[in-house]
Amino acid sequence: MNIDVRVDTKGMACPMPIVKGKKALDGMQQGQILELLSTDKGALNDFQAWVKKSPNEWISHEESNGVHRFLIRKG
Amino acid sequence: MEKEQTTIVLFSGDLDKAIAAFIIANGAAAYDHDVTIFFTFWGLNTMRKDEVVKTEKGLLEKMFGWMMPRGANKLGLSNMNMMGMGPKMIKHVMKKHNALTLPQLIEMAQEQGVKLVACTMTMDLLGLKQEELIDGMELAGVAAYLGDATNAKVNLFI
């Protein structure tokens, strides 16, 4: 999968991952894919809720060693 | 599509409550809501500039000005304030956890287009002038707040 924009929010606390993610998506074209990394333990619940309320599309989530990796398609 | 709205009344001038209010405001802005924070009573002190601004004031207004915290960096905690030790400790802990400071949260809210509104009635009571508050704030009363709050599904009083 081609990733168009990468945002690394590792180490950042709430609400930064969401704010950074939103900023990145605002600057993207429809259909482009965002990869966002976060070490915030609440990130999974945050991003699930947030994507559901946005026009964007959830692609995937994986976690390894406390780093969450989200893929989101700009809608 | 009509944007969702979030409104927050920040009545409190406590550091912890102001931080909570601004985290929610920034989160709501990231949800693409139109966000309004309405500052009234002690909440207005959050938005005071930290430098002394020369203004025409009566004695009572001047006294209020001296006694109230001058800006986001001077606020006390609602709990465990311990004569100002508490805020120092919490700022240290926040830095350790990479949490944004209150001034940074305020700046980010402005960057995200959060509408910051000062309540004119309580500005008069506390003797605060517009030039003492950080730039870019709007002035309004209860009707303007209710106008925004009526359309907002999220509406908090902090």
Image (tube, rainbow, N blue to C red):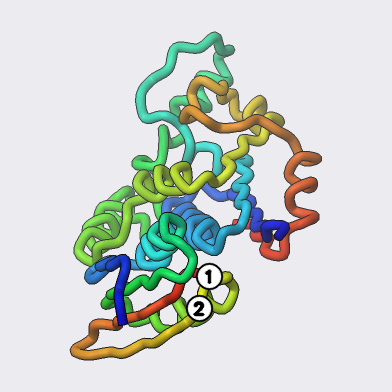
Residue A45 lies, in percent from the top left, at 46, 83
Q: Say if B147 sits above or below B121 in the image.
A: below
Which of the two labelled residues, at mark 1 and mark 2, occupies the earlier sequence position? 2
Tell me the residue that label 1 is attached to.
A75
- Percent from the top left, x then y, of residue A15? 40, 64
Q: Amino acid at mark 2?
A: Glu
Of residues A52 and B158, which is closer to you in this image?
A52
Which one is in front, B94 or A29? Answer: A29
Mark 1 nearby-residue class (10 Å; few <14, some 14–19, many ≥20): some
State the residue position of label 2.
A57
Amino acid type at circle 1 is Gly
Residue that appears at 36% across and 71% down:
A34
SS assignment at label 1:
loop
Q: Left or right of B158: which side holds B1?
A: right
Q: Is residue A20 above or below residue B135?
A: below
Co-location on one chain, circles 1 and 2: yes
Residue B82 tag number? none
Q: Residue at x 48, y 56 (%)?
A: B26
Q: Nearer the viewer, residue B136 or B12?
A: B136
Classify 10 Å Cα crowding around label 2: few (below 14), some (14-19), many (20 and above): some
Query: How far, Cα to Cα, is label 1 from label 2?
Result: 6 Å
Kindly identify the residue that appears in the image at 42 percent across and 76 percent down.
A72
